[in-house]
């Protein structure tokens, strides 16, 4: 609801509009479910990102970069990964740019250290050389998907192993 509609749309007001029920309403903002909503949102967000001096990468238009300088004088790129309304900001101090976005769009979870992005678990890890890095794992998402498949198979009196053996020509190792 942050973007203006790209086409002229109208609807008849429902009973939730009280005395306005039946009135013709002009839709001014891109609503979830409209075919043009994603494009309208991308356009609006792109304008905001460009005002913050971010540029989309050529490899992925959902990855935005901005030249910056670390506190110790080392140059680097700030990165913002944006998929629809999920934002992951990678930089030395994310609060500066995220606070600006929050003022424009009121981020539902505010700002802070991330723990999830696009159904993946994010965590800080220490590498072999002692440096700190971020890790993205899909363990929870995969576990949930497996549980869902197992539940559906159980309704048909099948197990995941039986289903796999029916479709796999190479025998599965037994653990």
Image (spheres, grey):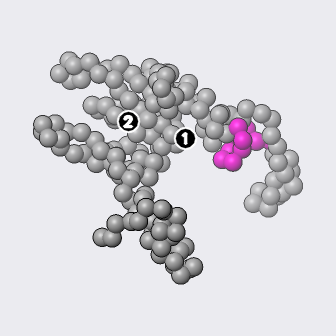
Residue 128 in percent (x, y) is at: 14, 41
Nearest the camera: 19 or 55?
A: 55
- Image coordinates of residue 160 in percent, x first then y, are 46, 71
Question: In front here: 22 or 147?
Answer: 147
x%, y% of residue 155?
Answer: 56, 79
Question: Label 1, on which residue?
Answer: 84
**5 and 58: which is toward the camera:** 58
The answer to whether residue 2 is visible is yes
- Is 12 included in the stretch rendered in magenta? no
Name the magenta segment's main secondary structure.
loop
Q: Residue at x 80, y 35 (%)?
A: 8
Instruction: State left or right for residue 126 relative to residue 96.
Output: left
Residue at 73% from the left image edge and 32% from the top image edge: 6
Q: Which residue is mark 2?
A: 89
**Relative side of 9 to 174, left or right:** right
- Dot 1 crowding, Cα within 10 Å, few <14, some 14–19, many 20+: few
For residue 171, above or below residue 109: below
- Residue at 51 percent across and 40 percent down: it is 83
User: Above or below — where is 52 with respect to 26?
Assistant: above
Q: How many marks?
A: 2
Q: 150 or 83, which is in the foreground?
A: 150
Q: Judge from the rendering whether residue 75 lies leftward or rightward of residue 14; answer left or right.
A: left
In this view of the protein, can residue 160 be seen by the observer? no
First of labels 2, 1 by sequence position: 1
Q: Mark 2: which secondary structure?
A: strand
Q: Is residue 29 magenta?
A: yes
Occupied quadrant, residue 171: bottom left
Q: Which residues are magenta?
A: 26-36
How many angstroms separate mark 2 from mark 1 (CA)? Answer: 14 Å
């Amino acid at each position: 609801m942050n973007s203006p509609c790209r086409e002229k749309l109208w609807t008849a007001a429902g009973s939730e509009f009280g005395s306005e029920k039946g009135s013709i309403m002009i839709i001014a903002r891109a609503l979830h479910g409209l075919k043009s909503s994603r494009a309208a949102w991308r356009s609006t967000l792109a304008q905001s990102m460009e005002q913050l001096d971010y540029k989309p990468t050529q490899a992925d238009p959902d990855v935005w970069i901005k030249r910056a300088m670390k506190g110790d004088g080392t140059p680097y790129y700030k990165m913002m990964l944006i998929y629809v309304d999920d934002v992951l900001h990678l930089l030395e101090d994310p609060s500066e740019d995220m606070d600006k976005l929050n003022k424009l769009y009121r981020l539902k979870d505010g700002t802070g250290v991330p723990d999830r992005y696009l159904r993946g678990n994010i965590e800080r890890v220490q590498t072999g050389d002692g440096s700190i890095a971020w890790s993205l794992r899909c363990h929870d998402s995969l576990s949930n998907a497996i549980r869902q498949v197992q539940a559906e198979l159980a309704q048909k009196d099948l197990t995941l192993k039986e289903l796999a053996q029916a479709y796999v020509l190479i025998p599965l190792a037994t653990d």
